[in-house]
Image (tube, rainbow, N blue to C red):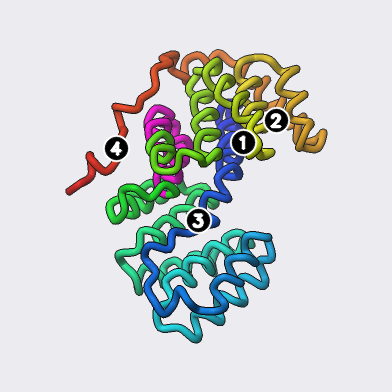
Amino acid sequence: MNSWKLFCMASCMVILSGCANDFAFLNSDLVTPPFEDHPKLKAAEIARARGDLPQAIHDYRDIIKECVNCEKAYIGLGMSLLDANAIEESKNTFDKAISLYPRSAEAYAGLGALYLTIDQPENAIQTFSTALKLNPSLAKALNGYAIALDMIGDHRGAQANYRAAMEQCPNNISYESNLGLSMALDGNTAEAIHILERLSRSPQVTPRVRQNLSLAYGLAGDMKMARNIGTVDLSSDWVRNNITYMEAVQETAEYAGLIPKNHEGPLNENRNWQDRNKN
């Protein structure tokens, strides 16, 4: 496997990690009484938010046993199982949710997140497309769709969809961080660093934002800055691995050929995903 492909695999892992929380808090628009008043629902959501996956899984399963309208419990269970790396159980749960609630954009978005996790971007693209046909303004689906496009190398399309997600959720730092990394992969390292440096000073900054910034500096050829930023959150072994990938990319002639050197944002190429997919 060539060095560029190795680096892309590492970069996609970074993007995915950066988006984990984007799928954590689900939209309640599709939930109808009496389910949303179920006493265990809030407890399950709190358990998942604090990382107590066994408790969250237990609570969601109890809700499914007790409740007729269990859409949100199925989705919460699927995401909790995915967080716990119980891939097969998670997929079975999302498949069940889709069979019961075929108009649920959230269920398709959850299944799309699973496909991203197991490195199946083509399946993720198809699944997020279905979610967006059902709910064109679902930010987590726009973001997931963009991640999948980045994974197959369509960085321009990815950036347009990150921007669309940002229009729906302007305060979501993960979407803009993903946009910055996508720009770096696209060769626009100066703008990527500008975006990620600004985000790194935000009170909402996460370790993933800093690691995206580290990768952007590495792609720009500044390995010293990449290493310094990387060591804030990662072990020395991980930092060495990341630097090795970035140095390999810098040393290969294919880098210039694989990353287009246009720096214009592609907003109006792919903006308003919903406008292109009304039918």
Estimate how packed mark 4 is, as few (under 14), some (14 to 19) or many (20 or more) residues with alpha carbons within 10 Å.
some
Residue 54 figure quarter: bottom right
**First along the sequence among labels 4 and 3:** 3
Mark 2: amino acid? Asn
**Residue beneath disc 4:** 272
Q: Which mark is residue 10?
A: 1
Q: Is 267 situated left or right of 190 in this image?
A: left
**Residue beneath disc 3:** 114
**Residue beneath disc 2:** 242
Real-space Cα distance between discs 4 and 1? 29 Å
Q: Residue 74 at what x, y percent from top left?
A: 47, 71
Residue 151 is covered by the magenta coloring = yes
Q: Are marks 2 and 4 in contact (CB under 8 Å)?
A: no
Q: Say above or below: 249 vs 159.
A: above
Provide the secondary structure element on which disc 2 rests: helix
Real-space Cα distance between discs 2 and 1? 8 Å
Provide the secondary structure element on which disc 4 rests: loop
Q: Residue at x 41, y 68 (%)?
A: 95
